[in-house]
Image: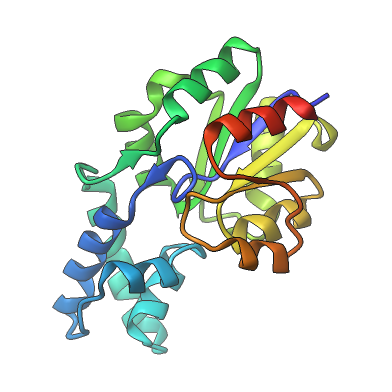
Amino acid sequence: MKTTILFDLDGTLLYTIKDIKHCLNQIITKYGYTAVDEQTTLKCIGYGAKELIIRSTGEKDALKVESMLKEYLVLQQACDNSMTELYPGLNELLYMLKKDGYKLGIVSNKPDSATQVVYKQLLSKYNFDFVTGCVDHLSPKPSADLVNLCLEKLNSTKEETLYVGDSEVDVKTFVNANVEGIGVLWGYRQKELLVKEGCKHFAVDTNELYSIIKSF
């Protein structure tokens, strides 16, 4: 029986692209790069803030990337997330999972400072048991580091855990962490990409996600 559900954040719990694009464009245009649209932001997102900047600019100079990253992190932490929304059905789902007694965690490649801000603004009412974004001493997803940190904090075993995400990064993460995973199809990636990485369980909406979770 599964007792712990870990959620990815961007593209799984929250539609965040508009706010991410807004913060990103403020930084990269300041440094002389062309602003990106939402589709480009979608393609670049998933591997953490540093990779987002590299992929959206094509910049390879480490010092320039670090300069942009430093300013981007400040902007993200200060973001009011006014253009970010909870995906349909998740309000009901999260309350049901808590009522059912599951331990809930968030494991994000968003910088931890920004993760904590958006959690406080939009998700704290669901009383997640542990929330983490990228932290300096651990590798970002698809490394298993952040999942392992979350399980340690929750005192949960891998056998008790389900990981829910929307991208190929998430599939690689739950494979690397050796936990069961579910791919949601309302997020930032297509099903074919998740299948390619080895995902076997898929949910088209939160009703189906709840049913799959309860089936384990």
Quarter of the picture containing the N terminus is top right
Is 104 left or right of 91, judged from the image as shown? Answer: right
In this orientation, does residue 156 appear? no
- In-front residue for pair 74/51: 51
- Identify the coloring: rainbow
- In-front residue for pair 196/72: 196
Residue 130 image position (x, y, % from top left): 55, 29
What residue appears at the point 20 percent right and 77 percent down from the top-left corner? 35
What residue appears at the point 38 percent right and 34 percent down from the top-left corner? 119
What residue appears at the point 71 percent right and 43 percent down from the top-left corner? 148
Quarter of the picture containing the C terminus is top right
Is 160 left or right of 119, judged from the image as shown? Answer: right
Residue 44 image position (x, y, % from top left): 42, 72
Q: Quadrant of residue 143?
A: bottom right
- Residue 158, placed above or below residue 99: below
- Residue 192, placed above or below residue 83: below
What residue appears at the point 71 percent right and 69 percent down from the top-left corner? 196
Residue 185 image position (x, y, % from top left): 55, 51
In this orientation, does residue 16 appear? yes
Q: Quadrant of residue 206?
A: top right
Q: How many marks?
A: 0
Residue 166 image position (x, y, % from top left): 55, 52
